[in-house]
Amino acid sequence: MARAFIFVLDSFGIGGAADADRYGDAGANTFAHIAEACAEGRADREGLRSGPLFVPYMASLGLGKAAETATGLGFASSGTDLLTTAFHGAAQEVSSGKDTPSGHWEIAGLPVRFDWGYFPDTVPAFPADLTEAIISEGKVPGILGNCHAPGTEIIERFGEEHIRTGKPICYTSVDSVLQIAAHEAHFGLERLYEFCKVVRRLVDPLRIGRVIARPFVGETTATFERTYNRHDYAVPPAEPTLLDRLTARGSRVIAIGKIGDIFAHRGISQVRKAAGNMAMFDEALGAMDDAGDGDLVFANFVDFDTEFGHRRDVAGYAAALETFDRRLPEAFARLRQGDLLILTADHGNDPTWRGTDHTRERIPVIGTGPGFKGGDIGLRTTFADIGETVAEHLGLAAGRYGTSFYAAIGGHA
């Protein structure tokens, strides 16, 4: 058996979702709109980046071709030749929603067939009985926020009051989440985690996908800053995923970043975390070095989403893509004969789009591996095709959802 590596560029959608209008996202296209802004000079920032978007290594895997597959529209070529072993295509999500668990679970071969619960865009956003239970069972003097809000903005609004009163900041978004911001020192990091576990239990009947701890530091509105000690408390998958199938047969799944949290730590052999995309890339490279036959390294690079997508920072997103791309040769160099590397995303977060939330988009499915013939894998009708391809590559029996494209890229069962 060989090894497999899935790198998720969190929120790096490529437009074209057939049901985007259902989500108010018809026309959203994270990749195309960033590239367009770069070409027009709207993503130039002194000391950060300038000029057209330059991602030659992802282009060599067929990123531009994948974008064409997703939208049916021509995409300007970067002038980079495709690697002979590269494959490219796009995938349409069948899960409901446009959030992290749905996207990742579907990538791992388990589409979400139920509807998540959501909180209304009202003030207050939470049902009164839930708020009362959070306060009483969480042993806090009250909560602040109780509304839809961007994470950095709500900390600016309520951070000083939170320090003064000890009331945690609870908020939500269009995703199936209840987020809790609290100060690492004044409230306490471990106390925040324990509080989130209580809230996780309380929102289970509402089918809320995640309760997210959002710790921050600083003493005033001007100095508040979220830290990398975020922790997601997710609903466990309802059925076995690719990760469960691998660990059940004795293979290792090394989770990089928030992958462990997303799967409620089910089917995970080891978790490696770090602060920031590039530190996460270092962890992913180390995991590639450590992975043995039949193992999977599953990595999430969250900064694209949290630092740039949600903050509608086009220049920052473009620079992050370029920085990530420059490091891809390090990953390529670690691939052994027969290894499989797939780059993809879990949803979109178009930084030029209205609002500050995720966007419903198709995702790129690009990759390579020594010994593969590569080629065009077309438009996949579910993200689960990724998981099934990895399953076949690693010698697992076919799962219930998705269709492997392993044979199309020159793989051998």
Image (cartoon, rainbow, N blue to C red):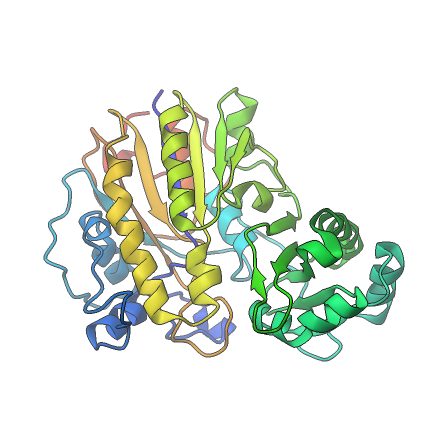
Residue 349 figure quarter:
bottom left
Q: Quadrant of the N terminus?
A: top left
Residue 384: percent from left, percent from top:
45, 45
* Image position, residue 102 (x, y; %): 54, 53
Q: Image point 45% across, 54% down: which residue?
A: 346
Query: 271 left or right of 343?
Result: right
Residue 339 seen in the current view: yes
Q: Is residue 117 left or right of residue 317?
A: right
Residue 207 occupies quadrant: bottom right
Going by the image, does 408 lie left or right of 345? left
- Height in image: 22 above or below 80? below
Q: Nearer the viewer, residue 267 or 282?
A: 282
What is the x, y in percent for residue 51?
A: 19, 69
Please provide percent x and percent y for residue 172: 65, 67
Residue sitting at 76 percent across and 48 percent down? Answer: 194
Q: Which corner quadrant of the image does residue 316 belong to?
A: bottom left
x 55%, y 60%: residue: 96
The answer to whether 116 is drawn above or below residue 296 in the figure is below
Residue toward you, 104 or 307? 307
Q: Most extreme residue toward the right, as rendered?
A: 136
Q: Which quadrant of the figure contains the C terminus?
A: top left
